[in-house]
Image (cartoon, helix red, strand yellow):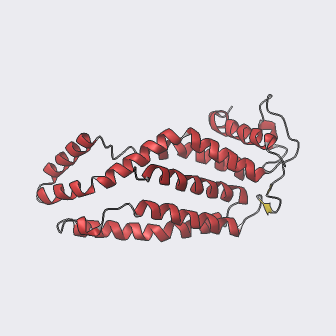
Amino acid sequence: MNLWHEILYRPLFNLLIGIYNIIPGADMGLAIIGLTILIKLLLWPLTHSSLKSQKALQEIQPKLEELKAKHKDDKEALAKAMMELYTAEKVNPLSSCLPILIQLPILIALYQVLSAGLTADSLNALYAFVPNPGTINETFLGFVNLAERSIPLAILAGILQFVQTRMLIAKRPPKKLRTKEGAKDEDMLAAMNDSMLYFMPVMTVVIGASLPGGLTLYWVAVNAISIFQQALAFRKKK
């Protein structure tokens, strides 16, 4: 028996069908959104920790700029000073990578679940305690066919991707806080961020337009929930 199939694919597939069974109107689109919300809730502790780390890194940028100016000719001393600052501020610059690494296998398994199609043959993967719905209604809200490509959903996913990326970029330190010594590196990073602001949404639309609507709807739901989570993590305390 395939280990990947049993550990990730089959549990996610059964969870999706289980949600589908209890949703009024037998709407697979709502089931996909429900599954997305559930997964994001389960991963929220890691996501929140990652976003808090990103926020902390943004807040100490002025101090990092001061260190770059102070140790502009000594990279080894700069690296040591930065690590001391991270320790003092209790910031882990690598913590944001952990949620991505954990979510990647889940995303791959979800892609397989949704791209394989919800056919009678795929329902053979159901656990004995999960009721077999017999047939699957592959529409969302009664008119969006999730088995076919959906340009409107792809565009919506792109718009949400733009908003999500813009929220992160908006948290960069103001240009006036950058040191002259680090201006070149900072300007290069700024240019890359600005490019990503438009590149990622465009790629989201292009890729989303080539996928079945179910996968694109999942992308829409992920982006929408991520925007909410970022707003929650970056909110200013009164």
User: Is 58 left or right of 153, judged from the image as shown?
Assistant: left
User: Is 130 left or right of 183, judged from the image as shown?
Assistant: right
The image position of residue 69, as x and y in percent, is 14, 60
Q: In which quarter of the image is the N terminus?
A: top right
In-front residue for pair 192/6: 192
Q: Which residue is drawn at 81% across and 54% down?
A: 138
Asked if 145 appears above or below 77 in the picture, the reply is below
The image position of residue 34, as x and y in percent, is 69, 46
- Total marks placed: 0
User: Is 146 left or right of 12, judged from the image as shown?
Assistant: right
Q: Residue at x 59, y 56 (%)?
A: 224
Q: Residue at x 26, y 44 (%)?
A: 86
In-front residue for pair 182/149: 182
The image position of residue 176, as x and y in percent, is 24, 69
Residue at the extreme top: 129
Residue at the extreme front: 238
Residue at the extreme right: 134
| Residue 117 appears in the picture as rendered | no
The image position of residue 111, as x and y in percent, is 65, 50
Asked if 79 appears above or below 163 in the picture, the reply is above
| Residue 76 appears in the picture as rendered | yes
Q: Residue at x 68, y 50 (%)?
A: 33
Looking at the rendering, which quadrant does residue 88 occupy? Answer: top left
